[in-house]
Image (tube, rainbow, N blue to C red):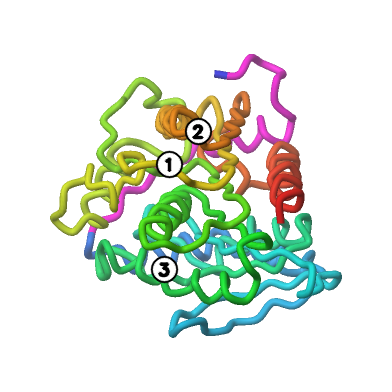
């Protein structure tokens, strides 16, 4: 836990607000309303991110998958990079609307075109359907941009998506992108560690367990396709992982970084003191700085 005064005033205020709110646990009957209410809650932040973005935002289709394309005004295809991005939400909520909060500044700061994949959600579309949507988009982007100008990025469940995508493409002989960035990746759906329970104001074990079962659709939670932490890391590209000392999923980020390094994958794990799960989503200085760092990491490699 962060010591008093070690986080910004804005982050301290946000933390207080988050801690005063309860974590809602959806059930199958109220899931549509849960998704609607979540989207509505974040729309002011989404509109702020959309207004601040200097470039073009449009919906497109790639290999039959709906995507949102963000192109900064100073991007040039001949030399510009591209990021394939996966949103978070535990596979059961979230979408390309809400995650503009992260995607828009990331595209702007990295000066990369960014493709948000609107993958299908569970439990209506359990594993492997969301992963299949990501897999259909990647070869197209690889063909257009080449591996040297391509990055893969995702937050939380999107971090799972990004990591799973890399492993699948490597296993099927596809070239790896220049790098990857994983924000608080939910890479172990079988995780039963509870040492950090209560520190994260945005996430608890009951919510995570419910989303995991819904996404797995009856398959084992430690299946490497569902929990890519259990898969081989050999041959993956340089990877940046971000998390926070309050992040409920910090432990799995540490285990992922260790396993990558043991497989000789270049991995940079950045733990932010006092921060919670995907803190980059929130309007605080720490989020702005982390997104700048992630963008610089991607820009330098693409």
From mark 1 to mark 3, how far is it between C-alphas? 19 Å
Residue 234: image tag: 1
Residue 264: image tag: 2
Boundaries of the magenta span:
2-27
Q: Is residue 60 magenta?
A: no
Outermost residue toward the right in this view: 74
Q: Is residue 17 magenta?
A: yes
Q: Is residue 126 visible?
A: yes
* Disc 3: which residue: 135
Residue depicted at 71% across the width and 56% down the height: 302
Q: Position of residue 157 (x, y in %)?
A: 42, 52
Closer to the camera in the image, 21 or 293: 293
Numbered disc in front, either 3 or 2 = 2
Mark 1 and mark 3 lie on one chain; the one further toward the N terminus is 3
SS of the residue at dot 1? loop
Q: Is residue 165 shown left or right of residue 32?
A: right
Label 3, residues with CA under 10 Å away: few <14, some 14-19, many ≥20: some
Q: Position of residue 19 (x, y in %)?
A: 50, 33
Q: Are marks 1 and 2 in contact (CB under 8 Å)?
A: yes
Closer to the camera in the image, 77 or 215: 77
Residue depicted at 60% across the width and 25% down the height: 274
Closer to the camera in the image, 113 or 204: 113
Q: Is residue 248 visible?
A: no
Closer to the camera in the image, 253 or 29: 253
Outermost residue toward the front in this view: 173
Q: Position of residue 39 (x, y in %)?
A: 50, 64
Q: Position of residue 241 (x, y in %)?
A: 56, 38
From mark 3 to mark 2, how far is it between C-alphas? 25 Å
Mark 3 and mark 2 lie on one chain; the one further toward the N terminus is 3
């Amino acid at each position: 836990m962060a010591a008093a005064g070690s986080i910004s005033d804005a982050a301290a205020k946000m933390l207080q607000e988050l801690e005063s709110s309860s974590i809602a646990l959806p059930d199958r009957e109220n899931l549509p309303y849960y998704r609607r209410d979540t989207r509505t809650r974040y729309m002011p932040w989404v509109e702020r991110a959309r207004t601040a973005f200097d470039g073009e935002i449009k919906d497109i289709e790639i290999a039959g998958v709906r995507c949102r394309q963000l192109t900064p005004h100073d991007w040039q295809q001949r030399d510009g990079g591209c990021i394939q991005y996966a949103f978070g939400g535990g596979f059961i909520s979230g979408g390309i609307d809400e995650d503009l909060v992260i995607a828009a500044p990331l595209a702007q700061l990295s000066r990369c075109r960014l493709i948000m994949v609107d993958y299908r959600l569970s439990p209506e579309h359990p594993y492997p359907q969301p992963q299949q949507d990501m897999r259909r988009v990647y070869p197209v982007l690889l063909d257009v941009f080449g591996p040297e100008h391509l990055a893969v990025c995702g937050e939380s469940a999107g971090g799972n998506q990004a990591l799973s995508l890399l492993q699948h493409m490597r296993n099927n002989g596809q070239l790896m992108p220049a790098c990857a960035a994983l924000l608080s990746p939910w890479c172990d759906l079988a995780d039963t560690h509870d040492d950090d329970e209560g520190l994260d104001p945005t996430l608890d074990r009951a919510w995570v367990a419910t989303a995991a079962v819904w996404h797995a659709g009856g398959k084992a939670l430690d299946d490497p396709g569902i929990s890519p932490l259990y898969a081989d890391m050999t041959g993956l590209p340089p990877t940046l992982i971000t998390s926070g000392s309050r992040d409920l999923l910090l432990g799995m980020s540490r285990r992922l970084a260790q396993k990558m390094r043991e497989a000789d994958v270049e991995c940079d794990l950045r733990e932010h003191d006092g921060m919670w799960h995907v803190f980059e989503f929130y309007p605080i200085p720490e989020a702005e700085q982390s997104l700048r760092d992630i963008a610089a990491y991607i820009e330098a490699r693409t």
